Image: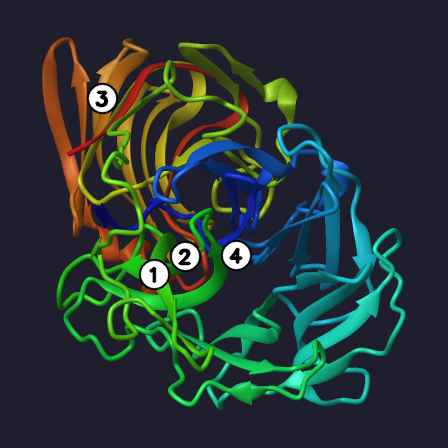
Amino acid sequence: MQFNNPVIKGFYPDPSVCRVDDTYYLICSSFQYFPGVPIFESKDLINWEQIGHCLTKTSQVQLAHVNSSGGVFAPTLRHHNGRFYMTTTNDTTRQNFYVWTDDIYGEWSEPIFVDQGGIDPDLYFEDQKAYFMSNGSDDFGVSGIVQSEIEIETGKKLTPSRTIWQGTGGRYLESPHMYKINGLYYLLAAEGGTEYGHMETYARGSSVSGPFEAYPHNPVLTNRNLGGYELQGVGHGDLVQDVEGNWWLFHLGFRQIGQWQTFHHLGREVFVAPVTFDEDGWFTAGHNGTTLLTFETDRISESVVQAEKKSFTFDNTEWDKDWCYLRHPHSQNYKLQSNKLTLKGTDVSLDQPGTPTFIGIRQKDFNAIISCDVHLTDGEAGITLYMDEHHHYDLAIRKDAEGYKVIERLNIGDIKSVENEVNLGSRNHAKLKIRATNDRYTFSLDTQGEEIELGSAHTKYLSSEVAGGFTGVVIGLYAYGEGSHAEFSEFKCDYI
């Protein structure tokens, strides 16, 4: 069959995957957004459905006043003796921890902390022992991939943290994962930074703690030399074996806005590439060591149809799965109904690393039409295309002394400008509409059957290349101002 990448679109970075019987589970980073660490499920490795989150309680993760791209970094998902474990880093507090559950559809435990530094932690189980890995420096000051044995019930270290591999020389050695395959231990890692030089490398050895011999042809997967190719930033992967015995590498990557336009604003997404072992036990990945936007493979049954959801509304999404908040929300400011949303604003704005009244859904593709009916009583409310507190575009209804008006506001770094406004007089409602293409957003409103265009802005100013950080654009509905009150209905995001 033929399948298309990415298999999970939008800001879902740092995938980690495991198989239990005939079902596959995958998790991703969430940074400052809550609930944390989304969970997906699949039967065929190509079609994925979100089933929940790992971190759903404020007691599980500290997100208050976390700057954008802080908070919950790259997680690892593993299954051992009937129990799921998710380990991750709160990069803001510099703490590695894990949570567990016996029911992946239910709640997860309170966090168990491990006294080992670095980020991108991994858990490996063997012979009733648990090994904890991360990047960083070990207890002796040596940098690299660091490993210790821990007591899984408490997180207590049973051995000193010791560096077991220092990579191949690429910068930002990270994302370690350990596997035992045909009697050998394989240590997978990412190098080069989660940017245009990103790559997957690996080594193998006869012991869980090394020494490890690097694959002679590293990197095993990278798109770093494919100039003018839409898919870039390939790396940070996790191996999984399917029910037929085939191996796959799930990894992140990002899509540029154009062939020669080196900007990406959708975030890092989930891609998959086939893996093949040779007779000497080394493996290769992808197409000549690169990931393609389309793969032809006979590993997946022709009966599998890759489905893609093209329209997202209040009615066909779930508030606790598809939508997210900035940090820990104040629940009294949200009324979530099947076809309507009511928000009460506060004095916390989108420009602050606090908890504004905001609920969002990730932008999943370049070309889209986003619309929503907004009824405002007081204050300001509308749609925001949100990258971080310093980079977002807002289309909103605002009330002032002269009445109601629709504004188009651009927030790019230190520049915050209301580019256009349309007076509504005493009318306190309008349909707000945003048209998205690869390189531009266009803002308009529909009032009394007349569509009025306010302006447009480049998508590149919401890209990681401009804004920095590790997230992607989230389509947010928000309210701002003490006493502000707004109702949202007829939300629709149609991908073209």
Are the two marked residues, 2 and 1, in contact with CB atoms closer than 8 angstroms? yes
Q: Which residue is mark 1?
A: 274
Q: Quadrant of residue 223?
A: bottom left
Q: Which residue is mark 4?
A: 69
Residue furthest to the front in view is 279
Callout in the foreground (1, 4) = 1
Q: Is residue 413 above or below residue 266?
A: below
Residue at 31% from the left image edge and 51% from the top image edge: 299
Residue 327: x and y in percent read 60, 41
- Going from the N terminus, do you reach mark 3 or mark 2 first? 2
Q: Which mark is residue 423?
A: 3
Residue 193: x and y in percent read 45, 75
Residue at 74% from the left image edge and 61% from the top image edge: 95
Q: Amino acid at mark 2?
A: Asn
- How far apart marks 3 and 2 lie (CA) works out to 61 Å
- How far apart marks 1 and 4 lie (CA) works out to 30 Å
Q: Is residue 463 left or right of residue 67?
A: left
Are the two marked residues, 3 and 2, in contact with CB atoms closer than 8 angstroms? no
Q: Is residue 483 above or below residue 453?
A: above
